[in-house]
Image: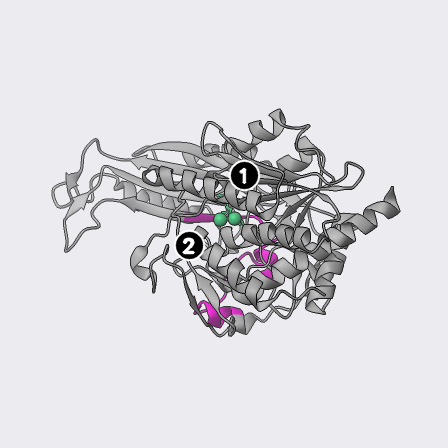
């Protein structure tokens, strides 16, 4: 067990507050200077924590912060990955306090307080746990592995430049395990380790009807309204069992054995609580699967945004020329994101009536990931949680995506251990994002145990 001192806790929190004040929104170029400032901040904090060197590596987009401490080449090396960029905070009016003015407040789930700010949980708070755990290990003479940090600034916009970076720096990034805190766990009483991530295929569609906006009285009823048509086409993408209707969509989906499903069902999940927490009328999803299965082992299709026509104050009678939607599909092994994007495009064009034109473009994407639990990385993490929480963690496949994780395995040949300390209720990507102080400190206390266990387990296999 590691117990942080009150003084250390206060300092760690104040430092994190500092970082959270920087609006490093990678999606919005108006914040470019802030994204660069966050990179600088992370680099400086790595140096202060005890890294031998910390560098800001430029890319074609936002830089990658790289820092390392090599204590003994014969010891195993841990590569820590995280991101310093954040999602846009919109819609701003739904925040109870400004997104980049962090405040501490208690909630039912976080009675000991939580820090509210964009990026608190995803991923500044979780990434910073690693820098502080590293500092703690150095100060307490407990660093048992070499460490490399690679903290990027484009995760929320698809990590476009990271693949080239890891390919070019393959030798420098050589490691025995990749350690990431950018996911969640079941609850503060029941930790879990993420063993899977879904892939992603993100599309944008435009439906064009007439060549200009028309008076809906003069033309209404006689021309195809692209918004009506788009709504109908989207509705057709799922059948009445909530299965996706794109031909070939499920062809490569790996079916989960009954044993695995039974194992998954052992993880605590309270459907009533789930429904109440987000105020649902009823649950919804693919027939034949439970809610936890629907959000982890099954692929999905969701509209993320839809627009067109008149949305201003009052009423305007108009048939718009164009209607648009952003549609994402979450993928599971062994679906291929580019292939799924092509199947989507082909199908979407095929179901369009002749009265409209359809354009489909593919945005970023990424492959799904699953990791077995019989490797020493997972075992070291399991033991670390068991020690610090006093309860055995469950392996759990998450529904979100970190497209770079499968690429790490391909390029660097190393497995990733996903030690997430966030909760689903922490509102990542939403207004009022927060991160529990319990989670922040518990993370910092659990990470050094991982290093210790990993170093010990590495000896047994070598
Ligand atoms: N940290 C999240 C991913 C995540 C969150 C995984 C919770 C599992 C549990 C990451 O920052 C993220 O938001 N990823 C995006 C994909 C990316 C390509 C924009 C996502 O999942 O939507
Ligand atoms: Mn993240
Ligand atoms: Mn995110």
- Corner quadrant of residue 357: top left
Q: 296 or 184, which is in the foreground?
A: 184
- Does residue 297 appear in the picture of this structure? no
**Secondary structure of the residue carrying numbered label 2:** loop
> In this picture, is 296 found above or below 1?
above
Q: Is residue 201 magenta?
A: no
User: Main SS of the magenta segment?
Assistant: loop
Corner quadrant of residue 260: bottom right
Residue depicted at 30% across the width and 45% down the height: 307
Q: Identify the residue position indicated by label 2 in the image.
A: 118
Secondary structure found at label 1: loop
What is the crowding at mark 1: few (fewer than 14 residues within 10 Å), some, or many (at least 20)? few
In depth, the one of 271 and 390 nearer the eye is 390
Q: Is residue 294 covered in magenta?
A: yes
The residue pinned by badge 1 equals: 247
Between 104 and 48, the residue placed more toward the observer is 48
Specify which label sits upstream in the sequence, 2 or 1. Answer: 2
Q: Position of residue 197 (x, y in %)?
A: 61, 48
Q: Is residue 87 visible?
A: yes
Magenta range is 274-303
Where does the image place residue 98, in percent across and percent down from the top left? Answer: 33, 59
Residue 387 in the image: state x and y as whole percent: 74, 65
């Amino acid at each position: 067990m590691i117990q942080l001192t009150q003084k250390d806790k206060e300092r760690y929190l104040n430092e994190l507050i500092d970082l959270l004040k920087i609006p490093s929104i990678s999606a919005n170029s108006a914040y470019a200077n802030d994204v660069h400032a966050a990179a600088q901040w992370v680099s400086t904090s790595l140096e202060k924590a005890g890294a031998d060197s910390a560098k800001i590596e430029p890319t074609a987009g936002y830089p990658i912060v790289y820092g390392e401490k090599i204590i003994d080449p014969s010891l195993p090396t841990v590569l820590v990955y995280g991101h310093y960029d954040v999602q846009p905070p919109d819609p701003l009016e739904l925040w109870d306090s400004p997104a980049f003015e962090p405040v501490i407040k208690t909630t039912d789930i976080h009675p000991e307080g939580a820090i509210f700010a964009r990026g608190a949980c995803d991923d500044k708070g979780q990434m910073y746990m690693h820098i502080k755990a590293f500092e703690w290990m150095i100060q307490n003479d407990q660093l048992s592995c070499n460490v490399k940090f690679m903290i990027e600034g484009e995760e929320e916009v698809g990590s476009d430049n990271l693949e080239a970076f890891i390919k070019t720096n393959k030798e420098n990034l050589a490691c025995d395990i990749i350690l990431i805190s950018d996911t969640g766990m079941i609850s503060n009483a029941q930790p879990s380790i993420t063993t899977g991530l879904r892939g992603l295929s993100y599309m944008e569609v435009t439906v064009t009807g007439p060549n200009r906006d028309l008076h809906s009285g003069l033309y209404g009823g006689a021309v195809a309204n692209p918004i009506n048509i788009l709504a109908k086409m989207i509705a057709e993408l799922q059948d009445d069992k909530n299965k996706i209707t794109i031909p070939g969509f499920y062809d490569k989906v790996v079916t989960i054995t009954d044993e695995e499903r039974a194992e998954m069902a052992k993880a605590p999940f309270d459907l009533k609580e789930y429904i109440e927490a987000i105020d649902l009328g009823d649950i919804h999803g693919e027939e034949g699967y439970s809610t936890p299965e629907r959000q982890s082992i099954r692929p999905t299709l969701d509209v993320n945004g839809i627009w067109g026509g008149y949305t201003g104050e009052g009423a305007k009678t108009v048939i718009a020329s164009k209607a648009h939607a952003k549609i994402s599909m979450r993928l599971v092994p062994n679906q291929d994101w580019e292939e799924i994007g092509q199947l989507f495009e082909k199908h979407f064009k095929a179901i369009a009536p002749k009265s409209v034109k359809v354009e489909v473009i593919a945005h970023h994407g990424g492959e799904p990931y699953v990791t077995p639990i019989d490797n020493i990385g997972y075992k070291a993490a399991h033991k670390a949680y068991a020690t610090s929480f006093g309860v055995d963690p469950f392996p759990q496949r998450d529904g979100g995506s970190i497209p770079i994780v499968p690429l790490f395995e391909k390029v660097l040949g190393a497995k990733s251990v996903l030690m997430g300390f966030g909760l689903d209720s922490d509102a990542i990507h939403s207004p009022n994002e927060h991160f529990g102080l319990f989670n922040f400190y518990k993370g910092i206390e659990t990470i050094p145990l991982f290093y210790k266990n990993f170093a010990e387990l590495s000896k047994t296999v070598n």
